[in-house]
Amino acid sequence: MGCVAYSVFMRFVLGFDGGGTKTDCVLMDENQQILARALGGPSNPMRVGFGGALASVCVAGRAAIRAANLTTAQIAVLCAGLAGASHPESEMKMQKLLLQEFPASAVHVCTDLDLTLEAAGDGPTVVLIMGTGSAAVGRDGDGKILRVGGHGPLLSDEGSAYDIGRIAAMQAMREFDRTQVNSALGTRVLKERGVADWPEFLSRANAIPDDVFPRIFSVVAAAAETGDIAARQILQVAAKELAMLVRDLVQRLQFTEQRFSIVRSGGMVGRSSYFDQQVDAYLREVVPRGEFAGLALPPAEAAARIALRLLPALNEAGN
């Protein structure tokens, strides 16, 4: 790759969209031109720890900086929207860690939900997150923002990839305990994880559940497409759980008469036509005034644009 020259007066920002599976990064200049994109590992500090989250963000950020032939000292602002950063303590800790790695940059930490809502565009909107975890976040016509769910796999994340994987494995293992024969879905689960039996599966699941359960979603989705009854039943329950998140949020936002947009976002979207159809059907049933829409831009790009909006504050601080 040839050397690219930039004006010494040009400023650059990094935007990150981090979740339980991967971290997307966008490097943008102040003219909103995207100069590089990069990927890192999972960066939800509640799942992989603060050290793991920091490492994933740094890997993605430095890869983007190298791709654009820049240095970390040239990054004016960094905006990291991370799942698991909704609590003030987590946000402040991640901000402190990122400031140590990017000392020349202003650092803003928010949640992945904030990014997705930003990426959805203007107006009354509800975003349903369908990924490793699950949540719903919404904004009313006055700009008030509320959220439902997204509290982690122990007490929340219903209908998520993690939840679907856990339920599928539990049902398959229970069937084996009852009959000593693996069901079709159980056989698929063991094969996907590359293990010979359920004791080996349990050992892996107990050691690294975030690496085991979310990956099973793809197995369940593929089985549902072939008509597997057990897989379809699991996805039906998950779709209803996700729709209930949206219903509860719509009630809190008091969208009683007005129209509003519903945006589905996350790694589960588009993986199974059967699952997508189930989610849409339940959403139409519980929130009939919602109108389906897509994201106006990728969340990592939304993070970069948030970072750009912070540049004027840097100018004022410098003066």
Image (cartoon, rainbow, N blue to C red):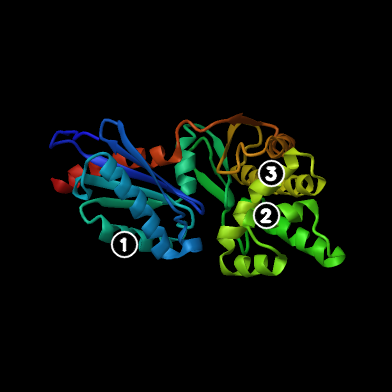
28 vs 145: above or below: above
* Three-letter code for the amino acid on which mark 2 is drawn: Lys
Q: Quadrant of the C terminus?
A: top left
- Between 314 and 177, the residue placed more toward the observer is 177
Q: Which residue carries the number 3 mark?
A: 221
Q: Residue at x 49, y 43 (%)?
A: 144
Distance in Å between CA atoms under marks 2 and 1: 42 Å
Q: Nearer the viewer, mark 3 or mark 1?
A: 3
Q: Residue at x 26, y 61 (%)?
A: 100
Q: Quadrant of residue 283?
A: top right
- Between 310 and 4, the residue placed more toward the observer is 4
Q: Nearer the viewer, mark 3 or mark 2?
A: 2
Q: Which mark is residue 191?
A: 2
Q: Earlier in the sequence, mark 3 or mark 1?
A: 1
Q: Position of residue 46 (x, y in %)?
A: 49, 62
> Which SS class for mark 1?
helix
